Every structure is written in structure tokens, then in C-alpha cells.
Amino acid sequence: MADEFLLPGMGLGGFLLSMNTMLMLEKKGLLTAVETKEIVEQALLNLETHEAMASPAEQPGFRSARTILEGLRLLLGRPSPSR
């Protein structure tokens, strides 16, 4: 992987881009709320798979990613006026 993708904040930037894209697709009716939730669940499963193979030095990053994805899962589980 190129060094420019290892800068602090790059993971969060990628997450925010993905999350906003997914929510925009849902808002436009291209994804259902159920499909959006399934994407988050798949991301968590994928994270677990990769976390199991990660070195101890990488564990803090995986914990942060899990916290963010679990927060998104909770957010998507709550009813809102736009859903």
C-alpha cells in the first residue's frame, strides 16, 4: 500500500466517504434501509475476519473501526423522520 494511504485520518476519511455514499444511495431509493443495515453488518463481519489475522500493533485501529461501525449500526437501527 502506498504511504500516502497510511496517513492519520485516512481510514476515517474513507469511512465517511463510504457512509455518506451509502446513505445518499438510500435517500435516492437505490438502497433500502434493510440493505443499508446489511452493508454495515457485512462490514463488521469483514472487520472480524481481518482483525483475527492482525498483529498486536494493528489492534487499536481495529477497535476504533469496530466502535465506529457499531455506532453506525445503532444509528441505523433508530427510526428517523427521513426513513
Image (cartoon, rainbow, N blue to C red):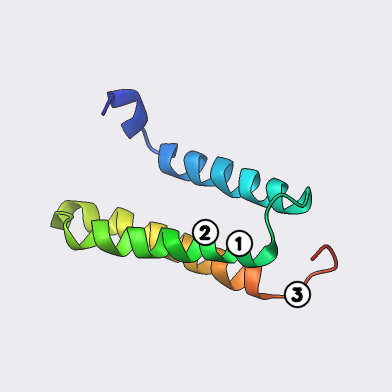
Q: Residue, x 43% and y 58% (percent of image)?
A: 43
Q: Amino acid at mark 3?
A: Pro
Residue 35, which numbered label? 1
Q: Element type at marker 2? A: helix
- Label 1 sits on a secondary structure element that is helix
Structural distance between the alpha carbons of marks 3 and 1: 15 Å
Q: Position of residue 48 (x, y in %)?
A: 30, 64
Asked if marks 1 and 2 touch (Cβ < 8 Å), the reply is yes
Q: Which mark is residue 79?
A: 3
Residue 21 or residue 12, whichever sits in front: 21
Pinpoint residue 6: horizontal percent, then vertical percent: 32, 33
Nearest-to-viewer mark from 3 and 2: 2
**Is 55 placed left or right of 5 in the picture?**
left
Residue 47: mark: none
Tell me the kind of residue under disc 1.
Glu
Q: Which residue is mark 2?
A: 39
Closer to the chain start, of discs 3 and 1, is: 1
